[in-house]
Amino acid sequence: MTDAEKLAEKYCHSMGQLLVDEGDLEEGIVFFQKAIDIGDTPYAWYGLSRSLGMAEDTAGAVGAISRAIKLAPGIPEYYYERSRLLAHLGRDDLADEDRNKAIGIDDNYRRIDTIKRAAGILEEAFEGVFHKPSCPVRSCPAYCCHFKDRLVLHGVTIGAWKLNALRAYFREKGLDERDFLEAFLVAGIENTDSLFSPHDIMKYNGAASVIFPRRKEHALGARLARDIPKGRSYLSLMWIDDTARPCCFFEDGRCSIYGAGGEPSLESCSSFLCMTGFVFVVLEHLGMFKEEWLAGASMAHLNQAAVEALVILAEDVYGNEELRACDPPDDDLKKKLIDRAERKISLVF
Ligand code: SF4
Ligand code: SF4
């Protein structure tokens, strides 16, 4: 696919998801099919499968998810989704086989419903609490700053205000902006208003463009890519794989332009936290985070510990029936529950 086709595919599968979320299954399915006509991507087939399942076309949904599995055989949620559909069709033997495949890739699939429920409870409890939080997992290779395609395709763009701040930064450091920034011409691209913020479309070298950071040369590699964390609903982060390359502003494990212009990072970056990052931000907010947890710990361990902490916080505190029933809120009970959760969490790190 060309970049223009990738953007058209992105628009169609995002629209498909939006329409399905709004309850318009019929139109959502049409958009997923349009996305697939442009590019045979596993996530569009996954989206199509979920919408067909919701529309009670279970056999069609099995066909769609089987195509996703063929394209991306290492994604556990696809096997899990197919096992749910097969169980619905009464094929428990095949459903068990797929469930075991999901568990074989990621042992957390033994209790995936608990994890997803816990993620929902914590999302709800901390909605709007954090404003552009900085991820405290400093030992992470910052998977979230790695991309398998040009950053513009993942929505990482630079608005006019940050561009001015970056130009001042380049001048101060004696750097040439052409080594760091790329422009994507938006002329002829459909649905630009849905794909990009209007503040990000500007004249660059005389043509309407979107500006975005270049990538560095070296790829993440198979060794590091083993321990990529999950997204906030425990879904795989499809834009990161072992071929993903770091953003050019990624230096010594940190974002070198984080504070340029006095605003934390780029708008698109500052809104992202993976599940591990989110749980650590919550732990830091609650005063439980200990720097020593990071020293010498592998990402695999931190990802798993974050899942354990997520489930403890959701089950023992924010999803606690007694606490939820209190009106007005009972701060003493909440403190007691948080203290107990803290003791349990300290054991998982
Ligand atoms: S948000 Fe996630 S991927 Fe990004 S640095 Fe933090 S732990 Fe790593
Ligand atoms: S601009 Fe900074 S935070 Fe955003 S991807 Fe690049 S290095 Fe990461």
Image (cartoon, grey):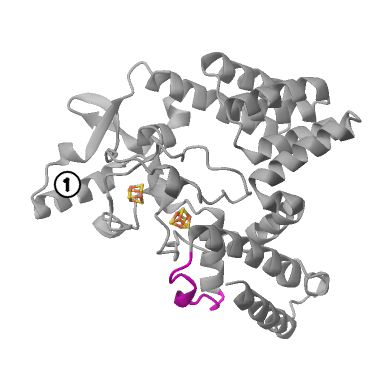
Q: Residues within 10 Å of mark 1 (few under 14, many from 20)?
A: some
Residue at the extreme right = 90
Main SS, magenta residues: loop
> Percent x, y for residue 252?
28, 58
Residue located beneath label 1 in the image? 167
In which quadrant of the rendered view does residue 59 lie?
Answer: top right
Please report the residue visible at 33 percent of the width from the left and 58 percent of the height from the top. Answer: 253
Q: Amino acid at mark 1?
A: Arg
Residue toward you, 280 or 252? 252
Q: Specify whether residue 105 is painted magenta.
A: no
> Percent x, y for residue 112?
73, 51
Residue toward you, 72 or 246? 72
Please report the residue visible at 38 percent of the width from the left and 34 percent of the height from the top. Answer: 198
> Percent x, y for residue 2?
39, 18
Please report the residue visible at 63 percent of the width from the left and 17 percent of the height from the top. Answer: 33
* Above or below, 96 relative to 292: above
Q: Quadrant of the N terminus?
A: top left
Please report the residue visible at 42 percent of the width from the left and 37 percent of the height from the top. Answer: 155
| Magenta region | 286-297
Q: Specify whether residue 295 is painted magenta.
A: yes
Q: Does residue 159 appear left or right of residue 61 in this picture? A: left
Residue at the extreme left = 174
In which quadrant of the rendered view does residue 93 lie?
Answer: top right
Q: How many marks?
A: 1
> Percent x, y for residue 281?
51, 66
* Above or below, 268 relative to 43: below
Is residue 57 visible in the rendered image? The answer is no
Q: Quadrant of the C terminus?
A: bottom right
Describe the element under mark 1 as helix, strand or loop: helix
Q: Does residue 58 appear left or right of residue 307 in this picture? A: right
